[in-house]
Image: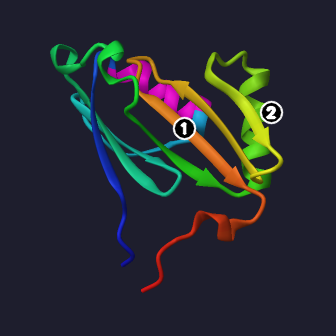
Amino acid sequence: MDPVFHLSLSVSDLTRTRRFYESMLGARAGRVTDQWVDLWLFGAQVTVYQRPAAVVPSPFREAQHFGATLDWDVWAGLVDRLVSTGCEFRLRPTVDEAKGQAKMMLADPDGYLVEIKAYTDPSLLQRPTS
């Protein structure tokens, strides 16, 4: 089995958060209980826990975010879909032609920032070898 990146977040409203990740970003629910949900998002497992008191106000985590790098065409399709829904972006979709990079950032209902990027040349990711 290949490793799977996992992230755990405390949220104030489990239903609203699940709806956001499923409808806006295309996540799919895995295991579901009354207190938490495993959401599969871009190949990673994001577990959201119903813990309103543990949600840190967003001004205290301005630089903190998580995200994914997608294929260029997949990124463009997601942008089109998000724009058509009236999505409020924290960073509107931008393309830097000189760098061959595109990115956007949005916030979930509790203010967790999700950055989604793409590169015209996938080798620009510069993944380490071995």
User: Does 63 sit left or right of 104 as displayed?
Assistant: left
| Magenta-drawn segment | 14-24
Mark 1 residue crowding within 10 angstroms, few (<14) / some (14–19) / many (20+): some
Residue 1 position by quadrant: bottom left
What's the residue at 39%, 23% (across, down)? Answer: 62
SS state under label 1: strand
What's the residue at 42%, 86% (across, down)? Answer: 130
- Disc 1 target residue: 115
Which is closer to the viewer, label 1 or label 2? 1
- Disc 2 target residue: 80
User: Image height check: is 74 above or below 62?
Assistant: below
Query: Between disc 1 and disc 2, whose residue precedes?
Result: 2
* Colouring chosen for the image of the structure: rainbow
Of the residues shown, which amino acid type is indicated by label 2? Answer: Asp
Instruction: Point out residue 129 in the picture as x, y percentages from the top left corner.
Output: 47, 83
Instruction: Point out residue 27 in the picture as x, y percentages from the top left corner.
Output: 52, 42
Name the residue at the left extreme.
Answer: 53
- Say which mark, if any, is on residue 28: none
Of the residues shown, which amino acid type is indicated by label 1? Answer: Glu
Instruction: Point out residue 111 in the picture as x, y percentages from the top left corner.
Output: 41, 19
What's the residue at 63%, 46% (across, down)? Answer: 117
Mark 2 residue crowding within 10 angstroms, few (<14) / some (14–19) / many (20+): few
Q: Can residue 55 be found in the magenta stretch?
A: no
As measured in the structure, the alpha-carbon distance from the residue carrying label 1 to the one carrying label 2 is 16 Å
User: Does 46 sit left or right of 9 as displayed?
Assistant: right
User: Image height check: is 25 above or below 83?
Assistant: below
Name the residue at the front extreme.
Answer: 98
User: Image height check: is 3 above or below 70?
Assistant: below
What's the residue at 16%, 14% (across, down)? Answer: 53
Name the residue at the bottom extreme.
Answer: 130
